[in-house]
Amino acid sequence: MTHAHAELPVDSKPAGSLLGDLARFVGLVTLTLALVVGALIGLGGTSQAAPKSNASVNSASVKVLRSSVIHLTNVARKSHGCRPLKQNSKLQKAAQRHANDMSKKRYFAHNSANGTVWWKRIMKAGYKDPGGENIARGFSSTAAVVKAWLNSPSHRKNIMNCQFRTIGIGFNTNGDYWVQDFGY
């Protein structure tokens, strides 16, 4: 079973007009087709399968997973006219800690099991200007999790927020917990 959930910035606004929603839908369809065709011919981005167990996870494989999620996210952002996100070690630390915590304590939420909200977790990791968070569970590859986030309006809104400048990715194989933390 797979799940995805997004937390929007505190000052997020309601969706736009019907014409704007239609334009976003057409953009999403175009992006999805580009990712699928690109993956088939090896140009649109890289997708990495998630490791099967914590025992097979090493720093090199996690680095490849993170790079793949960031690359696929930036491909989507480019089609929307946004600048690419840069990886940030503090956001990465916050995202990885949350993925590990959800896996260890068997929950799936933006608020930690102890009640800490997502933006306070990010600030505790040393990042001073948190922007948003996407979480997902149960996806076995980077392409699958990014595609799911892009197919969800609230997740897509975080990914396509052109004001965000930085990103951190967390992943835990025990339940395939994914976290995408964004910053200004």
Image: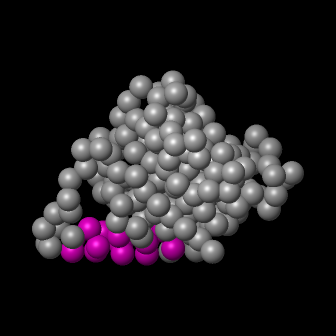
The one of 156 and 73 positioned closer to us in this rendering: 156
3 displayed left or right of 177: left
* Magenta part, dominant SS: helix
Q: Quadrant of the C terminus?
A: top left
Residue 122 in picture, x, y percent from top left: 49, 34
Above or below, 157 relative to 162? below
Q: In percent of the image, x 47 and y 53: which residue is there?
A: 134
Quarter of the image for residue 160 reads bottom left
57 displayed left or right of 65: right
Q: In percent of the image, x 55 and y 45: which residue is there?
A: 112
Quarter of the image for residue 174 reads bottom right
81 displayed left or right of 20: right
Above or below, 115 relative to 71? above
Above or below, 156 relative to 92? below
Q: Which residues are magenta?
A: 22-36
Q: Quadrant of the N terminus?
A: bottom right
Residue 70 in picture, x, y percent from top left: 52, 49
98 displayed left or right of 17: right
Quarter of the image for residue 182 reads top left
Q: Residue furthest front?
A: 114
The one of 106 and 1 positioned closer to us in this rendering: 106
* Residue 11 visible in the current orientation: yes
Residue 179 in picture, x, y percent from top left: 55, 50
Magenta run includes residue 82:
no
Magenta run includes residue 27:
yes
Q: In percent of the image, x 14 and y 73: which residue is there?
A: 18
Q: Residue furthest right?
A: 55
* Residue 86 visible in the current orientation: no
The one of 47 and 137 positioned closer to us in this rendering: 137
